[in-house]
Amino acid sequence: MVGGDYRLPSLAVRDFTARGGWWVAAQVPLFGGLLAFWLLWGDGWGAVALVAGAALAGAGGALVAGGLAALGSQLTPFPAPLHGGALVERGAYRLVRHPIYGGILLGALGVSLADGNWPGLVLAAALGGLFWAKSWVEEGMLATRFATYAAYRARVRRRLIPGIL
């Protein structure tokens, strides 16, 4: 290649890495595995598991919807906040610091429980661990970007699930 063209992929990878892209990439096989297990597995554990799972999935959906509504145009899959964005403390972010992660986790647990799906529960737990670690990295980036983040974190004690986690 002529000139500096050979460096373009390197710059793209550096930008992807700086924004926390590998955390996003790590989610893909977990989401894919969950979908595959939900479609291919599932013994059903009865009415109680079905109702409890549906309740968890519904609560998760509400938490995700609240997080999406509060973030609006600032939504990004990356842990790094958007340039020029503001710290969001309204809506679902008054309950937990990462409502979308928590809602996805509740939804994955709920669907797996309702389906009677042990492998799904295991992958949902792995996704929860990934979200916990990703949120830790994200909080470091938020604290660096926003001077008021430490006070927000002190006010909103739960990271993923209101009253629990």
Image: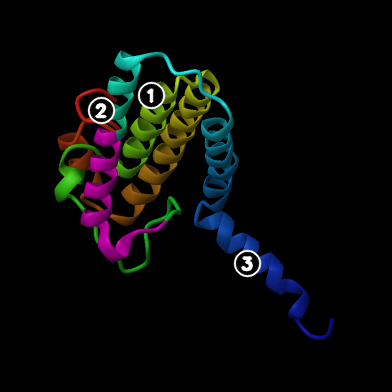
Judged by its main secondary structure, the magenta piece is helix
- Disc 2 marks a residue whose amino acid type is Ala
Q: Residue at x 37, y 63 (%)?
A: 82
Q: Residue at x 39, y 39 (%)?
A: 135
Q: Residue at x 33, y 24 (%)?
A: 53
Instruction: Using the image as rendered, state which of residue 99 and residue 4 is in the foreground.
Output: 99
Q: Nearer the viewer, mark 1 or mark 3?
A: 1
Give whichever of discs 1 and 2 has the lower sequence position. 2
Q: Horizontal and vertical percent for residue 155?
A: 15, 36
Q: Horizontal and vertical percent for residue 87?
A: 24, 55
The reply to whether discs 1 and 2 touch (Cβ–Cβ < 8 Å) is no
Location of mark 1 (residue): 114
Give whichever of discs 1 and 3 has the lower sequence position. 3
Its colouring scheme is rainbow
Instruction: Using the image as rendered, state which of residue 4 and residue 59 is in the foreground.
Output: 59
Give whichever of discs 3 and 2 has the lower sequence position. 3
Within 10 Å of the Cα at label 1, are there few (<14), some (14-19), or many (20+) other Cα atoms?
Answer: many
Which stretch is magenta?
A: 58-76
Callout 3: helix, strand or loop?
helix
The reply to whether discs 1 and 3 touch (Cβ–Cβ < 8 Å) is no
- Disc 3 marks a residue whose amino acid type is Ala
Instruction: Using the image as rendered, state which of residue 81 and residue 77 is in the foreground.
Output: 77
